Image (cartoon, rainbow, N blue to C red):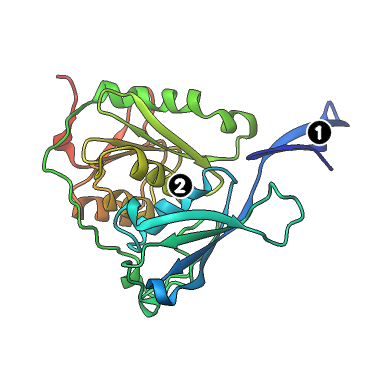
Amino acid sequence: MIVKRSQGIQELKIYRLEHNELQPTQDQLTVEEPLEIKLNYGPKENRQTRSLTITMRTPGHDQELALGFLYAEGIIGQASEVLSMRFEAGQLEEAAQQNVLRVDLAPEVQLDWSQLSRHFYSSSSCGICGKGSIEMISAISCYTTLPSYPKVAASTLLQLPQILLEAQQTFSQTGGLHAAALFDTNGQLLCLREDVGRHNAMDKLLGTALRKYDWPLRDKILLLSGRISFELVQKAAMAAIPIIAAVGAPSTLAVELAEEYQISLIGFLKSDKFNLYSGVERVNDGK
């Protein structure tokens, strides 16, 4: 039974087993709902609207999610190519539950739907489910990282997980969210986004950065709350992020892609240690 609901969090009546007895209590869960992204595109005299994707996400920062998703997929190259975004009336009764987002693209944006072979249904756990072929996974970015730049102290990296944990307000209430955060090389937290899907959190972060920071992000550090997947490295590479750190493990394909794009990849980041899988030249151990 739903007791109370706010953006991103839903309070439920549950029963908890304690001391061999079921006791009524309340619990807070992360909200997960579908977001459909529709594109309005084409020349002024022949505009068309077509559904692009449905992704399961935690409501909040939906416009940033869409913006980051479109950039990471190579559909747009800059934020100015999106003229406007607005929610359309869906089938849900509550007005607050807006789950259909229409994105109006500039007339000069060219779309080749035949090349978008991914059916663009993304589950909250995997952002590349539905790819037509492995060749379509790798998006080509027009930006590259700079060799051996920037430098970061190992002591700075060791501080990042605690900073992230203290900043994750929704996670502290539900325990059910992934996070993607942007730091400068001094360890200052610039931006944090959370979502039930790790790829959605990354898209929200990219969408925010497209609007807020100088592009590309060649002097920033990306911190992930979970594991490092191929897709998250690919999204970071699109923005030329040079350093990726995570509290979890990378996959083999994530390491290979990081090496290809000359990205420093750090896994199992804790307060006293980490593993450095690629790009050792950017990390100063202080010796």
Please, is residue 273 above or below residue 176 in the view?
above
* Secondary structure of residue under mark 1: strand
Measured in 3D between alpha carbons, the distance from the residue under mark 2 to the one under mark 1, in whole angstroms, is: 37 Å
For marks 2 and 1, give the one nearer the viewer.
2
Disc 2: which residue? 64
Q: Which residue is rendered at x = 40% and y = 33% of the image?
A: 191
Crowd around label 1: few <14 · some 14–19 · many ≥20 (10 Å)? some
Type of amino acid at the residue the image marks with label 1: Arg
In the picture, measured across the screen, residue 25 lies left or right of residue 149, that is right
Residue 264 appears left or right of 209: left
Q: Is residue 21 visible?
A: no
Q: Which residue is mark 1?
A: 16
* Amino acid found under the numbered disc labelled 2: Glu
**Residue that protrudes farthest toward the front in the picture:** 45
Residue at the spot x=35%, y=56% of the render? 71
Q: Quadrant of the N terminus?
A: top right
Query: Quadrant where the C terminus lies?
Result: top left
From this viewpoint, is residue 64 visible? Answer: yes
Residue at x 40%, y 51% (from the top left corner): 68
Say whether residue 106 is left or right of residue 186. right
Label 2 secondary element: helix
**Residue placed most toward the observer, 229 or 66:** 66
Q: Residue at x 39, y 52 (%)?
A: 229
The circle drawn on residue 158 is none
Viewer-side residue, 45 vs 130? 45
User: Residue 123 placed where, x, y %?
Assistant: 55, 59
Compared with residue 146, is residue 188 higher up or lower down, i.e. above or below?
above
Residue 114 locus on image (x, y percent): 38, 80
- Residue 112 in percent (x, y) is at 35, 76
